[in-house]
Image (cartoon, rainbow, N blue to C red):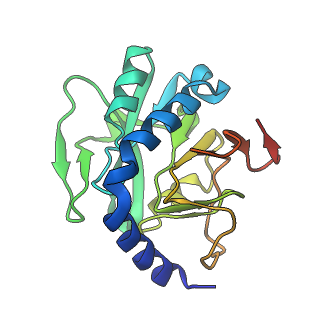
Amino acid sequence: MLTKEVFRKQQLKRLASRFQEQQLYALAKLQAKLLQTSAWKEAKTVALTLSTNLELDTKSLILTALNAQKQVVLPQTLPGNQMRFIEMTESTTFKKTAFGVIEPNGSLETTLPKDQIDLIIVPGVAFSANGKRVGYGGGFYDRYLKDYRGVTIALADELRFFPEPLWQIDATDVDVDYVITVNGGGFENVKEKISW
């Protein structure tokens, strides 16, 4: 069993070397499966991210959500490894963080409370079949999801999906509710172990 830091470093290297060749195929399949879920169909407010180079491109999902009249919120990092979600509108401006991530400028007035977010698409570098995940090392999502009561979904292409976690699990880790995979059973409810 690898420490999370060692696993994350190895996984990021693996993603960097093989990611581009698989992204378009994986993105189309994962998005199609996501759009068929009741969680997506019923969600009025969806939290997404602005993807980085090694992540599945989220632009099409953001556009799909907006075209479906869903409210889209994007994460903004705060001191102390905290984050909040800012509503995306036509007037939203963006900035690049010290980590090289693009995020919205926002304030408390444009922050959406957790209980108003129906669905969060959770990013990460690796996901297991039982909902474990490895993020990028800041713990932002684990802190945010600790008391979140909506639905969480991970989109796991073949490079990000692991049947069992190969990394250590920390007490502060928060599992995702569902993992959607390219070749697997589709939409798996991790918590209830129901496979569709």
Closer-to-camera residue (109/136): 136
Residue 145 place in picture, x, y as percent = 57, 53
Task: Please give the count of numbered marks on the rendered protein.
Answer: 0
Camera sees residue 56: no
The residue lying at 58 percent from left, 36 percent from top is 115
The percent coordinates of residue 76 (x first, y second) are 33, 49
In the depicted structure, whether residue 52 falls above or below residue 125:
above
Q: What residue appears at the point 49 percent right and 59 percent down from the top-left corner?
A: 159
Picture coordinates of residue 143, whole percent (x, y): 53, 61
At x 33% / y 58%, what residue is drawn? Answer: 78
Q: Quadrant of the N terminus?
A: bottom right
Q: Is residue 28 visible?
A: yes
* Position of residue 13 in the picture relative to residue 44 (left or right): left
Q: Is residue 88 above or below residue 165?
A: above
Tell me if residue 96 comes above or below residue 44 in the rendering: below
The answer to which image quadrant residue 60 occupies is top left
Q: Tell which residue pokes out farthest to the front in this image.
A: 21
- Residue drawn 47% across the image and 66% down it: 139
Residue 44 image point, x, y percent: 53, 21
Q: Nearer the viewer, residue 182 or 123?
A: 182
The quadrant of the image that shows the C terminus is: top right
